[in-house]
Image (cartoon, helix red, strand yellow):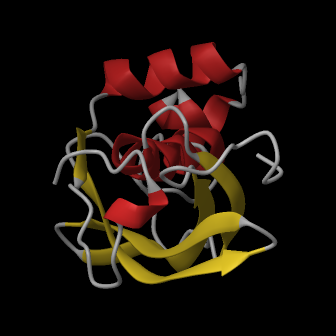
Amino acid sequence: MTPAPHWDDVSAGDELAPAIYPLSVMRLVMAVGANRDFNSIHHNADFARASGAPDLYANTYFLQGMWERCVRDHIGPQGRILALHGFRMKAFHTPGQTVTVRARVQRTWLEEGLGLVEIHIHSETEKGLSVGPGRVIASLPRRGVDQASSGT
């Protein structure tokens, strides 16, 4: 689905384009460098295994970024992510896996002039649900409404 830059273009039931992330050691090491989470469990397989994990694994910031990308690709640069609920990691995300983020618009509503959207979202690997399920609340500009006067 193409980005919906206006609230008026979004409907309950709209499916967001999935965000797909093949995980490699390089990608995970680059992620911890980028978000400065240098805990060895995220970049050293031997250390991670010694802690009880199956291998080095993706950190929280990287996984949350996957959710944000899935939503951001749908709401565009003018949309605002206001809240994230239900982000719960249920499995390790290790090299060799592919993580797919799936999301669907649950509802839309107006509140104090803002066009709001509730998006249900989760991540999955080949083994099933891995993060979530959760929900994201976002605001989108409305057609013909001065955004400065509507609080966005």
Q: Position of residue 74 (x, y in %)?
A: 35, 49
Locate residue 121: give its quadrant. Answer: bottom left
Locate residue 126: give its quadrant. Answer: bottom left
Q: Is residue 75 visible?
A: yes
Q: Identify the image quadrant of the N terminus.
A: bottom left
Locate residue 136: give its quadrant. Answer: bottom right
Horizontal relation, residue 37 to residue 133: left or right: right
Q: Position of residue 2 (x, y in %)?
A: 19, 46
Residue sitting farthest toward the front: 144
Q: Residue at x 34, y 51 (%)?
A: 4
Q: Residue at x 53, y 27 (%)?
A: 44
Q: Nearer the viewer, residue 21 or 152?
A: 152
Q: Nearer the viewer, residue 151 or 24?
A: 151
Q: Position of residue 39 (x, y in %)?
A: 72, 31
Residue 142 to residue 12: above or below = above
Residue 106 to residue 6: above or below = below
Q: Residue at x 56, y 45 (%)?
A: 79
Horizontal relation, residue 119 to residue 15: left or right: right
Residue 137 to residue 75: above or below = below
Q: Residue at x 68, y 43 (%)?
A: 146
Q: Nearer the viewer, residue 51 or 103?
A: 103
Q: Position of residue 69 (x, y in %)?
A: 43, 41
